[in-house]
């Protein structure tokens, strides 16, 4: 029997923005968290436009924001996500973390233990995406 303080395995990946794929420079812009035992799939997004333009002054933040939001829509099973959003949680996570050669790319999948996957998504956003407070 699971207690409220028990921890379960979760998986996560960072969503990366690669504005000029040929250069390979990237900017972390979100996280996707999946916990099968807790029936959880969630995302957090943050596109730092100043950092994006430091990599590519011609990058279109609105278009990149829409691509990031499309990933979040799949996580949330939003009707605008289409067929991908209607898949089971695990299938959606695997679809979102499949390698791509596009402007928005998933990083490698990592694992951990958590008692609260929603709070874990917040923690990972702060740790891996948001600018470091100076």
Image (cartoon, rainbow, N blue to C red):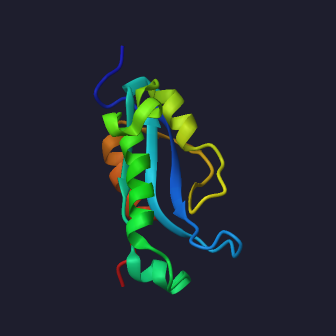
Q: Residue at x 71, y 72 (%)?
A: 22
Q: Residue at x 41, y 26 (%)?
A: 86
Question: Could you say which quadrant of the image residue 97 lies in?
Answer: top right
Q: Residue at x 53, y 28 (%)?
A: 91
Q: Residue at x 51, y 28 (%)?
A: 90
Picture coordinates of residue 37, whole percent (x, y): 43, 24
Residue 124 seen by the camera: no
Residue 85 or residue 111, whichever sits in front: 85
Residue 111 seen by the camera: yes
Picture coordinates of residue 80, whole percent (x, y): 34, 39
Residue 73 or residue 43, whichever sits in front: 73
Tell me: residue 113, above or below residue 18.
above
Picture coordinates of residue 13, whole percent (x, y): 53, 49
Residue farthest right in this picture: 22
Relative to residue 112, is residue 133 drawn left or right? left
Quadrant location, the N terminus: top left
Question: Could you say which quadrant of the image residue 50 lies in?
Answer: bottom left
Relative to residue 95, is residue 61 drawn left or right? left
Tell me: residue 106, above or below residue 98.
below
Question: Could you say which quadrant of the image residue 64 lies in?
Answer: bottom left
Quadrant location, the C terminus: bottom left
């Amino acid at each position: 029997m699971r207690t409220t303080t028990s921890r379960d395995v979760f998986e996560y990946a960072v969503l990366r923005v690669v504005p000029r794929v040929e250069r390979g420079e990237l900017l972390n812009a979100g996280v996707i968290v999946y916990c099968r035992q807790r029936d959880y799939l969630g995302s957090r997004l943050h596109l730092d436009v100043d950092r994006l333009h430091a990599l590519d002054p011609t990058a279109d933040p609105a278009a990149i924001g829409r691509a990031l939001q499309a990933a979040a829509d799949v996580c949330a099973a939003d009707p605008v996500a289409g067929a991908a959003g209607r898949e089971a949680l695990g299938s959606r996570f695997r679809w979102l973390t499949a390698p791509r050669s596009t402007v928005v790319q998933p990083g490698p999948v990592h694992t951990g233990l958590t008692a609260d996957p929603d709070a874990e998504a917040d923690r990972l956003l702060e740790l891996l995406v948001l600018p470091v407070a100076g």
